[in-house]
Image: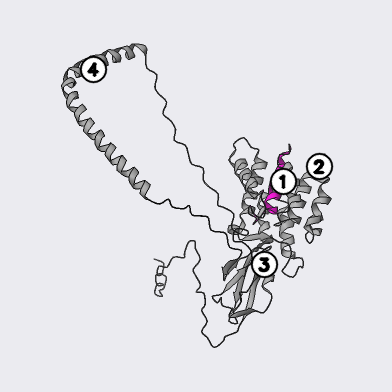
């Protein structure tokens, strides 16, 4: 209940929960972690992360589980520019999941946290409110049932009801998507996708040398000495001819190196290309991925053919007014979704009518 009260003012939740996060009772600590996760979901608040980070090392396993899940809820759809601790939590989830000696409860928390932080292909966030700021009953019920995953783990799937796509889609009067652009007055890296996870490269196993007995080593040494004596008798004559050829090859190499040095001296030194400065804005195409914090800096570019009936800052689906109805509109063609496709084979015709008779 506390977390749902602070959904409208998440910045007040850490100060209220700070003492509860240090309680001697592990159940209270777990509840404090989940309250922070629900109230501060998708905000990336430093104060909330500062309380959750030490709880990820709690001696009680289910407190660690709650802290891992809550940290993912707070940092969902955040990158290193908006929340520097995101990279730390991502590596922590991967470490806990891959560690064979970790407790099962902590592992489960890390697996759920990994799914939350990358929800919907990193195109969704957790929101218990509607666009107008009213409480979304469906999302609240989904979050409530999700918190009971400790009783029956399939209840964790109810969290999907709390997810909300972070998108900006413009539609014309026919509810079709025209080709248009939005302008985001922020650097592209500020609201960019976080970098994808990299698979660990397996190191090639080195071959271990087999042990050799001293007797066999002595025999091999004697055989090698005999072969060397026989080869020396044949090679002495060939060495003289080889030495003359080597001297000629060395002279040619020296001449080539001198010529290369002279060419380098004649060439003018090229200046190092400086990195191009990052632009202060970004052009987004319809439909666009726009985070909740990004909506306040998004608007329609000047001279645009379309005007939004409602402010673009509201996000989601926006109806557009065509200022040039006489001109032909360019519409985005729908693309078939990925995944397994239905079989397109022709079905056999039904059999002809017949009468059944028993013999």
Q: Earlier in the sequence, mark 3 or mark 4?
A: 4
Task: Select label 1 or label 4 by which is in front.
Answer: 4
The stretch of residues the image draws in magenta is 57-84
Number of on-image labels: 4
Residue labelled with disc 2: 22
Element type at marker 2?
helix
Task: Select label 4 or label 2 by which is in front.
Answer: 4
Task: Select label 3 or label 1 by which is in front.
Answer: 3
Identity of the residue drawn at 39% across and 19% down: 211
State the separation of the CA atoms marked 3 and 1. Answer: 32 Å
Q: Residues within 10 Å of mark 3 (few under 14, many from 20)?
A: few
Left or right, 183 with reference to 235: right
State the separation of the CA atoms marked 2 and 1. Answer: 13 Å
Identity of the residue drawn at 65% across and 40% down: 104
- Image quarter in which the N terminus is found: bottom right
Residue labelled with disc 3: 297
Residue labelled with disc 4: 228
Q: Residues within 10 Å of mark 1 (few under 14, many from 20)?
A: many
Element type at marker 4?
helix
State the separation of the CA atoms marked 4 and 2. Answer: 78 Å
Q: Which mark is residue 67?
A: 1
Query: Does the magenta-highlighted stretch encompass residue 69?
Result: yes
Where residue 292 appears, as percent x and y from the top left, is: 68, 63
């Amino acid at each position: 209940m506390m977390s749902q009260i602070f959904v409208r003012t998440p910045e007040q939740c850490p100060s209220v929960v700070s003492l509860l996060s240090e309680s001697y009772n592990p159940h209270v600590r777990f509840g404090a972690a989940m309250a922070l996760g629900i109230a501060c979901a998708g905000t990336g608040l430093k104060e909330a992360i500062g309380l959750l980070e030490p709880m990820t090392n709690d001696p009680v396993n289910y407190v660690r589980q709650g802290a891992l899940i809550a940290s993912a809820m707070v940092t969902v759809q955040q990158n290193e520019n908006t929340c520097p601790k995101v990279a730390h939590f991502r590596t922590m989830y991967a470490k806990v999941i891959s560690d064979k000696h970790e407790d099962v409860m902590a592992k489960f928390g890390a697996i759920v946290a990994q799914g939350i932080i990358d929800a919907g292909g990193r195109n969704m966030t957790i929101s218990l409110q509607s666009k107008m700021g009213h409480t979304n009953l469906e999302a609240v019920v989904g979050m409530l049932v999700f918190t009971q995953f400790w009783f029956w783990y399939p209840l964790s799937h109810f969290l999907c009801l709390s997810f909300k796509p972070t998108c900006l889609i413009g539609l014309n009067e026919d509810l079709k998507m025209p080709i248009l652009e939005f302008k985001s007055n922020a650097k592209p890296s500020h609201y960019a996708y976080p970098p994808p996870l990299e698979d660990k490269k397996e190191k090639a196993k080195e071959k271990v040398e087999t042990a050799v007995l001293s007797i066999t080593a002595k025999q091999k040494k004697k055989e090698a000495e005999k072969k060397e004596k026989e080869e020396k008798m044949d090679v002495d004559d060939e060495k003289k001819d080889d030495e003359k050829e080597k001297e000629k090859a060395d002279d040619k190499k020296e001449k080539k190196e001198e010529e290369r040095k002279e060419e380098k001296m004649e060439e003018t030194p090229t200046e190092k290309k400086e990195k191009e400065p990052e632009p202060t804005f970004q052009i987004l195409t319809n439909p666009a991925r726009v985070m909740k914090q990004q909506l306040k800096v998004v608007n329609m570019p000047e001279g645009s053919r379309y005007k939004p009936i409602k402010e673009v800052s509201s996000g989601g689906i926006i109806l557009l007014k065509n200022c040039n109805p006489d001109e032909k509109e360019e519409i985005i063609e729908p693309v078939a979704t990925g995944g397994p496709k239905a079989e397109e084979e022709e079905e056999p015709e039904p059999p002809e009518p017949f009468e059944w008779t028993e013999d």
